[in-house]
Amino acid sequence: MKLIDEKKVTSGMKGRIFRNSLFKNIFLLATLLCLLFLIVLFWRILSQGLAYLDWQFLNSLPSRKPEKAGIYTALNGTLWMMAVVVPVTMILGIGTAIYLEEYAKKNKFTTFIQVNISNLAGVPSVVYGLLGLTIFVRALNLGTSVLAAGLTMSLLILPVVIVSAQEAIRAVPNSLREASYGMGATKWQTILNVVLPAALPGILTGTILALSRAIGETAPLVVLGIPLYLAFLPTSFLDEFTALPMQIYNWTSRPQAEFQNLAAAGIIVLLAILIIMNSVAILIRNKFQKKY
Amino acid sequence: MPDKKESQSISVQKLIAEKRKKGSKKRTEKIIPFILLLTAIVSVFTTLGILFTLLVETFTFFSHVSLVEFLTNNTWYPFSDPGEFGIWPLVSGTIRVTGIAILVAVPIGLAAAIYLSEYASDRVKRIIKPILEVLAGIPTIVYGFFALTFVTPVLQKLIPELEIFNALSPGLVMGIMITPTIASLSEDAMSAVPDKIRHGSLGLGATKFETAMKVVLPAASSGIIASIVLGISRAIGETMIVSIAGGSTPNLSFSVTSSIQTMTAYIVQVAQGDAGYGTTIYYSIYAVGFTLFLFTLVMNLLASWISRRIREEY
Amino acid sequence: MAMTAKKERERATDIQEKKTKNIVYKTKELNLWYGEKHALKNINLDIAENEITAIIGPSGCGKSTYIKTLNRMVDLVPGVKTSGEILYRGRNIFDKDYEVEELRTRVGMVFQNPNPFPKSIYDNVAYGPRIHGIRDKKILDQIVEKSLRGAAIWDEVKDRLHDNAYGLSGGQQQRLCIARCLAIEPDVILMDEPTSALDPISTLKIEELVQELKNEFSIIIVTHNMQQAARISDKTAFFLNGEVIEFDDTDKIFSTPSDQRTEDYITGRFG
């Protein structure tokens, strides 16, 4: 006697195959939902903000009158802030990555640093805001300056920069290091002349992506107390400033429809910057992808 | 120095020996690792800074308000005199928004992960993955704007009693925001399941769907759970969407249609206003921040503990 | 250092007259451990100047470890311990005040897989001189040309010196790596299975090159290819399980080995 009733299996087969293709399509639809959301989001923001986006918008100071308002100070402030963030994160991020990958011995202290970095990556950005408020704004008395905000943002994106730089350095094959040591090069010469140049595209890709996060972050700036409205440009790193996401936030929280349209226009500029940065990062990644 | 044109006449070793005398290589080699170590220590000091900041200011807060009140009072109304500082309304706001976000993100994220790892061709993957990356890269202020100016009005047409500020709209949008996190980490976990396990199931005549649900998902379960926990952690810490679209009325209830306030939104509200330095309200944002920090820390540790167990499986 | 440079020049002129050759490397009672694993056991070897010394043996016999000990590249492996002495030109390379960088400047190395840097051909060859402080463009140009000629690759690359080295074929890359090594005019060249990743024609070119280089350099070559050892080397050492079983003139090793195990190996009974 057979234990399996073949008829039953055969008759059930159709339903099982149908279920398979049904769920395949459900899974695909769910995935496409993300695409749909993205399309609606872009369409909505473009249709709202495109009309306000012109040379005058980029070149004007903020104003109480929507038709005169612009993002000149905000855009400028973001640039000032990035002028702090870029060197600070590059130096600290790449330095840490080199230390961990090339120098650090495998011991508890190194593991601790590594675990600590991955935990920092999970700390909410608003908490970094509190850190910056206490340490940079108050204790170091930097106020709501470019420097205070830049340093806070640097600490926020540092874990991301470190981890991506580590991956890029780890991807450099050991045979290249050996070749350099074999010529009598010292460790630092090898790192500087062989490892870093080979890892640079990877490091840059990761860093640019992290920097684009810093440009869009709003919460830490709000917590630091960066002004929502400012009618003058910073002239030094110790001056007050406002940034693009702050300006967008300011307009978003106004009830009048015109200001919301301005916010949409600001968002278009912000997204354009981010898209350009991401494209550059992808270009670098594709151009320099090397097979060792 | 040899100056003849004949290249044979250069002694490279001799040149090297001359340069070696002048060089200060040795000192550089000793100083550099020390400098690099200092840069690595910055991240340790960041953690210490966060802990120190939160602890000290929270401690000051508890010298104004008792811990008992913080944990047992069911009202958060700091702007009265004396203010009421019961944390639960804020926690309840955070939980409601996070819950909605998870209800959106888990099904969509898992569906996308299953589709990508079990069904999609490489070509389809190359189209879908960047879309998810774009979703993950959009600043939260943009999501907040979208929630307030588009999602809420649309929802109001469907649910007339929905207030302008509510938990539902930011929750839904936040769900989309954390979908990429869950999708990509879950897909990693599912792709890590060895093909021989799949073949074992397919070879018995099981369909791809049956294989995915009964073999791949259970095998990848710890990675998937870890991705969900990380998604929860991100939702708890998310600030701008809830600040813009969630409102600023902390309340302890189950309502998702009325205005709420999350822990993060409260911090933003106070930081933006002019609560003077040294007031109880000023210190309260650190107590709330510390609570928030604990929530996310527990989630992150849980996620890394779960995902560390993956490696033991195969 | 000036002394050795002088000595080197003397050596180059009166090398033909000398009957008994100078010893470059004298290994005395060398033992090496990777953690608990005893990888080299009581090695005693004298390696002579301007000869090609081949090191053969089955995989895992310690031949690569030995050659990497000669320029202390083995230091890079965590958990390595050594005892005994290796005298390079009379000085123990394990001495505390012996700088590995100085040793490696005198002893060049060519690796198993071609490993040019992801830089231009020119920059690859100029790498060594540059890190040792030679910046003069004219001198660098001369060194690059001389080294590329020395590695028999000049004619193939002279029109594209500033192209990326990754555009070269595997065999060309390996000759570039030899040129890179020649650029610091080493005294000894260590070659760790330099042709194992190459096709037969590239291998032949490298073998011819190695025999030419013998006139100016002392060469120690690790190979798993016995025919290669027989074709190109003057002396051959047979390693087995971390020990030197036999070390003699190549002709003798391959015709009348004195140890049964050597004979078994070269006749292909194991390995």
Image (cartoon, rainbow, N blue to C red):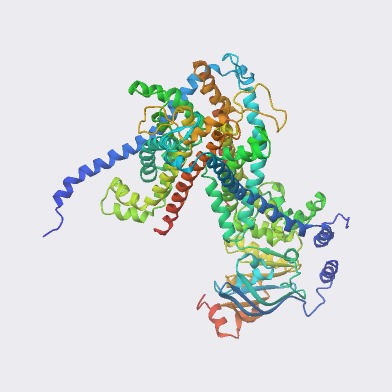
Q: How many marks?
A: 0
Q: Nearer the viewer, residue A279 or A247?
A: A247
Residue C226 quadrant: bottom right
Quadrant placement of the N terminus of chain C: bottom right
Give the side of residue B247 with respect to residue B40, left or right: left
Q: Position of residue C108 (x, y in %)?
A: 71, 64
Q: Position of residue A102 (x, y in %)?
A: 63, 56
Q: Is residue A290 visible?
A: no
Q: Is residue C119 visible?
A: yes
- Determine whether C39 is above or below A6 in the image: below
- Determine whether A18 is above or below A53 in the image: below
| Residue lying farthest to the front in this orientation | B82
Question: Residue drawn at (37%, 53%), measured in percent from left and top?
Answer: B195
| Residue lying farthest to the left in this orientation | A1
Q: Nearer the viewer, residue A192 or B80?
A: B80
Residue A40 quadrant: top left
Give the side of residue A289 with respect to residue C217, left or right: left
- Determine whether C42 is above or below A40 in the image: below
Q: Position of residue A258 (x, y in %)?
A: 52, 16
Q: Position of residue A4 (x, y in %)?
A: 15, 55
Residue B13 quadrant: bottom right
Question: Residue drawn at (68%, 48%), measured in percent from left and top?
Answer: C120
Q: Nearer the viewer, residue B181 or A190?
A: B181
